Amino acid sequence: MREERKGMLIVVSGAAGTGKGTICHELLTWDQTIRFSVSVTTRKPRPQEVEGVHYYFITEERYDELLAQDAFVEHATVHGHRYGTLKSEVDSLIENGFNVLLDIDSQGAKEVIRQRPDCVSIFILPPSYQALRDRLEKRNTEDPDEIERRMHNAYGEIALKHLYQYNVVNDDLDTAVNAVRAIVTAEKQRTTRYFPVVE
Ligand code: 5GP
């Protein structure tokens, strides 16, 4: 059957330690039509992180240049580091027919939702603040100060959960992943982005 599809922008946010990264990863391996939008950041790479895969790691000077060139769909300072979604990254993926996944914080999500109201927005929640703290401590990628900073930010992020079209609680990972897949599956069938041609 002949059909046409318009690519969609999927915005996923959630405080650090909610399992948002794992859920995004599951989504990307499950559906090859979804591509990750690689952001720029001024943060230093973590040991397993790869340039151009997880982020484009750039200097403060380069970030300022990109800002001056109006190169960002959105940008924000998160946990003291600067992050931005490149217009070029998102537009080239959409033009090539892909659905684009943005893993961004709620300041950035607010901006994307404003600019691109047809985007699909999903917020991942922890089952409790204690569970969030446990996960951050277990992950062992941040020092205690950084954990406190991330916990503090979590309260602010979670207060904005109503901005999103969908809220998903990650208590059990499989259940949360299934919920996100169901959202994406349904959103693909919207008449605004799916055009089947009946011969
Ligand atoms: P991390 O440094 O742990 O990779 O990410 C910290 C936070 O920054 C996460 O909440 C992540 O979603 C967010 N983030 C990553 N890239 C971007 C971006 O391009 N824009 C915004 N607004 N947030 C981002």
Image: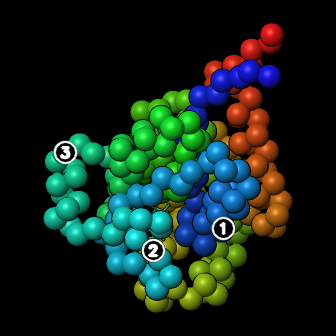
Q: Are marks 2 and 1 in contact (CB under 8 Å)?
A: no
Reading the image, the residue beneath label 2 is: 50
Question: Residue 197 placed where, x, y %?
Answer: 74, 14
Residue drawn 64% across the image and 87% down it: 138
Q: Is residue 73 above or below residue 39?
A: above
- How far from the left and from the top, in percent, is residue 86? 36, 49
Dot 3 or dot 2, earlier in sequence: 2
Q: Between marks 2 and 1, how big is the CA–CA gap? A: 16 Å
Image point (69%, 19%), residue name: 195
Q: Say which label, 3 or 1, has the lower sequence index.
A: 1
- Residue type beneath disc 3: Gln
User: CA–CA distance between discs 3 and 1?
Assistant: 33 Å
Observer-nearest of 182 and 127: 182
Q: Cβ–Cβ below 8 Å for labels 3 and 1? A: no
Instruction: Residue at 19% x, 45% y: name it.
Output: 69
Residue situated in front as seen by the camera: 142 or 45: 45
Q: Which residue is mark 1?
A: 22
Q: Is residue 49 above or below residue 4?
A: below
Q: Is mark 1 within 8 Å of ligand 1?
A: no
Q: Nearer the viewer, mark 3 or mark 2?
A: 2
Label 2 lies in ligand 1 vicinity (Cβ under 8 Å) = no
Return the residue nearer the eye: 125 or 39: 39
At label 1, which amino acid type do we have?
Thr
Residue at the extreme top:
199
Q: In the rendered image, which quarter contains the N terminus?
A: top right
Which secondary structure, mark 3? loop
Q: Is residue 17 left or right of residue 181?
A: left
Residue identified by numbered label 3: 69
Residue 2 in the image: x percent, y percent?
74, 21
Give the structural element (helix, strand or loop) at label 2: loop
Q: Position of residue 63 (x, y in %)?
A: 23, 60
